[in-house]
Image (cartoon, rainbow, N blue to C red):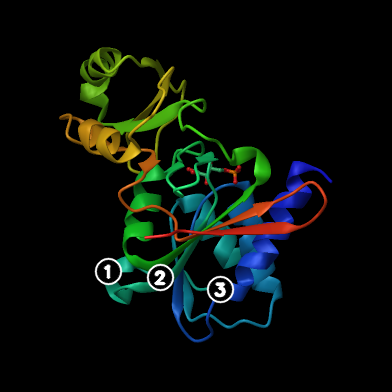
Amino acid sequence: MTADDMKKAVALAALEYVPDDTPIGVGTGSTANHFIDALGASRIRVTGAVASSEATAARLKKVGIDVLDLNATGTLAVYVDGADEANHHLHLIKGGGGALTREKIVAAASQKFICIADESKEVKVLGEFPLPVEVLPMARSFVGREMVKLNGDPELRDGFQTDNGNLILDVHGLSIIDPVELESTINQIPGVVTCGLFARRPADVLLLGTPDGQVRTVTRQD
Ligand code: 5RP
């Protein structure tokens, strides 16, 4: 079973968490794309979806799901998205696709966050995947220097602009022992829009696809 097959399996499994007749939130990336396709092909009738990126909005429209404005929906019942890394507290690193800020907003505005990923994304300590940080263009170098002070090695994502018109610094070399504290520390640096740590608002349920075709469910303990 390939990683893509595992992503498809968890995308299908996530449908169980989607109620009828209500708006939901949808993330960005290849796993989220499988979820969009599965939702479009299912009998579930959501009233529409808030997209975490322009790419997700386009894919939702393609499968016939209305794209909604978060300002008009209020709190969403559920948010479904992938991740780049997840620990056993269901703290995540996200932003490999550069959509971290809108993803964080939609996750925060949702009652339940269902994270879907193949098993390779499960880690003991976050940080092997470089931490994406969205920065305002004028603050790029300043934020980079601040990342070095935190023992990180920042790299500008070459030729990439976020949907919000900003830049991404991918910060290598961080061993993230306290994700909640580091998320706050980085987010308080002037010029940072947000970092890709999802620890203050972690996932509630993590669905992990395994090589034998099964889906392992991890539920967050409060
Ligand atoms: C996009 C993300 C994605 O969820 C993350 O990069 C995982 O992507 P994929 O499902 O393609 O493995 O955070 O900003």
Image quarter for residue 217? bottom right
The residue lying at 52 percent from left, 39 percent from top is 85
Q: Residues within 10 Å of mark 1 (few under 14, many from 20)?
A: few
The residue lying at 70 percent from left, 58 percent from top is 215
Question: Disc 1 marks which residue?
Answer: 71
Looking at the picture, does residue 10 appear above or below residue 64?
A: above
Amino acid bearing label 2? Leu
* Contact check, label 1 and label 3, Cβ < 8 Å: no
Q: Is mark 2 within 8 Å of ligand 1?
A: no
Looking at the picture, does residue 151 appear above or below residue 188?
A: above
Q: Mark 2 or mark 3: which comes first in sequence? A: 3
- Quarter of the rendered image showing ligand 1: top right
Question: Disc 2 marks which residue?
Answer: 68
SS at mark 1 in the image = helix
**Left or right of 52 in this view: 72:** left
| Nearer mark to the viewer, of 1 and 3 | 3
The residue lying at 30 percent from left, 49 percent from top is 200
* Contact check, label 2 and label 1, Cβ < 8 Å: no
| Nearer mark to the viewer, of 2 and 3 | 3
Question: Disc 3 marks which residue?
Answer: 17
**Left or right of 170 in this view: 37:** right
